[in-house]
Image: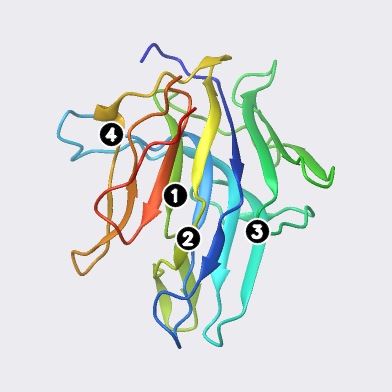
Amino acid sequence: RKTPITAVSANWTVPTASAHQSGQAEYSAMWIGIGGGCIDPNCTVTDETLIQLGTEQDVNADGSTSYSAWWETIPAPSITTSVTIHPGDQIHAAITQSTVPETWNMTIQDLTDGQSFNGLTSLPLPYPSDYTTGEFIVETPVVTSTSGAGIGSMPDLSGAGFDLATIDGASAGFTPAEAIQLVGSSGGVEATPSAPDSDTDGFAVCTYSSSCSAPGS
């Protein structure tokens, strides 16, 4: 894609999370971002900068669920916003470089109930980016505990997918070749993106499946 990329946005429905394996805590993150992509054709080297904004859908070990909205600039920890998130809520999220280079406007709106968060990642210092990739991701996040940090287990997600995605104000124009399947540490498939929808600005994501049907538009 043409670079530099200085703005991304997308809409999604907060997916419903349920336990894939009873008795264990499971975590999922759905987000848009700038940076963090592959630098070389074989993806052996990735960009170390990444600006992220999205929702989290988790299942606790007792089967209860929790949902939140957050933003993050790697390697700093994620920051939870004040927006209350429920499964089925319609979300609009946008990351845009401000008029001051390397400062970033972060906006997340819950279109279902009118809540919103608007922040500027300018403190304590501007955040640099290599501006090379726009990201639209469903994944298992890094989870920290008293025993250390590691990749969490993915819950079952119902209704995951992006729509109305833009890069630098234009339709994202997704292609099948850009899709990346999420494979767990044991080698099993944890999430598969579908082919792009008919207007190439969205796609579905299916957990624990090697195939996923594309949405209509």
- Which is closer to the viewer, label 1 or label 2? 2
Tell me how far mark 1 sits from mark 2, CA to CA.
Answer: 10 Å
Please give the residue where the numbered disc 2 appears in the rendered image.
157
Which residue is at the front of the view, 27 or 198?
A: 198
Give the residue type that dot 4 points to. Answer: Cys
Which residue is at the front of the view, 49 or 60?
A: 60
Please give the residue where the numbered disc 1 appears in the rendered image.
138
Say if mark 4 contacts mark 1, CB within 8 Å: no
Q: Which of marks 2 and 3 is nearer the N terminus?
A: 3
Q: Pick out the residue farthest to the front.
A: 216
Give the residue type that dot 1 points to. Answer: Val
Q: Is residue 117 depicted above or below 141 in this figure?
A: above
Q: Earlier in the sequence, mark 1 or mark 3?
A: 3
Say if mark 2 contacts mark 3, CB within 8 Å: no
Q: Residue 87 carries which label?
A: 3
Q: Residue 38 carries which label?
A: 4
Q: Earlier in the sequence, mark 3 or mark 4?
A: 4
Give the residue type that dot 2 points to. Answer: Leu
Say if mark 1 contacts mark 2, CB within 8 Å: yes
Q: Which of marks 4 and 1 is nearer the N terminus?
A: 4
Tell me how far mark 3 sits from mark 4, CA to CA.
Answer: 32 Å
Q: Pick out the residue farthest to the left.
A: 42
Where residue 48 appears, as percent x and y from the top left, is 38, 40
- Which is closer to the viewer, label 1 or label 3? 3
Residue 48 located left or right of residue 172: left
Residue 168: image quadrant is: top right
Which residue is at the front of the view, 141 or 111?
A: 111
Tell me how far mark 2 sits from mark 3, CA to CA.
Answer: 10 Å
